[in-house]
Amino acid sequence: MKGYGKGGCCIPQRASPPLSAGAIGPAATRGAAFTGDGMCLVPGGFFRMGGVDADGRPEDGEGPVRQVHLDPFLIDRTAVTNAAFEEFVGVTGHITEAERFGWSFVFRPAARRSPEGSGQRVSPEAPWWQAVDGACWKMPEGPGSSVADRPGHPVVHVSWNDAAAYARWAGKRLPSEAEWEKAARGGLDSKRFPWGDDLMPGGRHMCNIWQGSFPYRNSAEDGFPHTAPADSFDANGFGLHNVAGNVWEWCADWWSTIWHVEERPTTRENPAGPPTGEDRVVRGGSYLCHASYCNRYRVAARTFSAPDMTTSHTGFRCARSVGLKP
């Protein structure tokens, strides 16, 4: 269990013990190939991974840009939804880590008020995050909230361990960071976003991120003050929805900012990340991302979180090697 400050403003981390009180529809895609179980085929071959964007974060290890070769693979068209996760829980009886811990982080303006005397715990490094007793995947804002009215939204408050358990049950796996980035690029080379270099081409919103002044006012000009349905906005060239914004997505890799810098076969041919680590990679940004403080909804952007971490803006999608069946 980690301290609250680890992970910075985007993703807080658990503390032990806790601190004291104190839409746009889908569009046709460029040659996308789909399977019957909602997965998209990403062709094998080389792609340029990483970025040196002027708006990037060198401390995150976004660069260098390098040629990476991947075998073909399948990846979910959308993030795993509340409905799909509910089916998994119903079949397996899985209890998520947020449920085991008894609390999870909720974006403070959306959090349900805790009962009198239960305490209000906030992250000192990012006070817009509140640790809410009882918050979990089926009560995303805390007790009294429900996912009954959002079955098609991405499931949140799932840890890396929860995501990996779902993937195993589904006969899939979590994507490697390289697979995630190639899939997110949709066949475009070295663009800032899955659709190109312009955040709002022709003034059109292409993803669910923060508009306004973070963290005080979200105008929700893109149509969504919080999560959006998993298939919202245009799909990219491989058929994937919402690989920028909406929810962060877990990758299989351990986090490192230096492992990929040295050019060697393990970092260039089907890379799977370093062999060990403390934190796991998350990708894609979320509905809370804004250029003024995070700006990690760019395709090359990356950050990390502890494997037991759960928040109201982190979910996942699954991958599978070509030829493998559940």
Image (cartoon, rainbow, N blue to C red):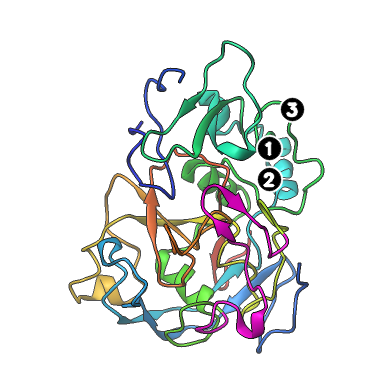
Determine whether 323 is above or below 85 in the image. Answer: below
Give the quadrant of the N terminus: top left
Q: What is the three-letter code of the residue carrying label 3?
A: Gly
Disc 2 designates what residue?
Answer: 85
Front one among 30 and 195: 195
Q: Which mark is residue 89?
A: 1
Residue interval drawn in magenta? 195-223
283 relative to 203 in the view: left or right: left
Percent from the top left, x then y, of residue 91? 72, 38
Q: Secondary structure at mark 3?
A: loop
- Picture quarter containing residue 118? top right
Determine whether 42 is above or below 13 in the image. Answer: below
Looking at the image, the residue that sits furthest to the top is 117
Percent from the top left, x then y, of residue 135? 61, 30
- Residue at position x 82%, y 44% in the image: 149
Check disc 2: other Cα within 10 Å, few if <14, some if 14-19, many if 20+. Answer: many
Percent from the top left, x then y, of residue 71? 45, 78
Q: Which mark is residue 144?
A: 3
- How far apart, in angstroms, are the residues tagged by discs 1 and 3? 20 Å
- How far apart, in angstroms, are the residues tagged by discs 3 and 2? 20 Å
Q: Secondary structure at mark 1?
A: helix
Whether residue 272 can be seen here: yes
Check disc 1: other Cα within 10 Å, few if <14, some if 14-19, many if 20+. Answer: some
Front one among 144 and 156: 144
Whether residue 237 can be seen here: no
Asked if labels 1 and 2 touch by Cβ distance under 8 angstroms, the answer is: yes
- Residue at position x 34%, y 34% in the image: 2
Give the quadrant of the C terminus: bottom right
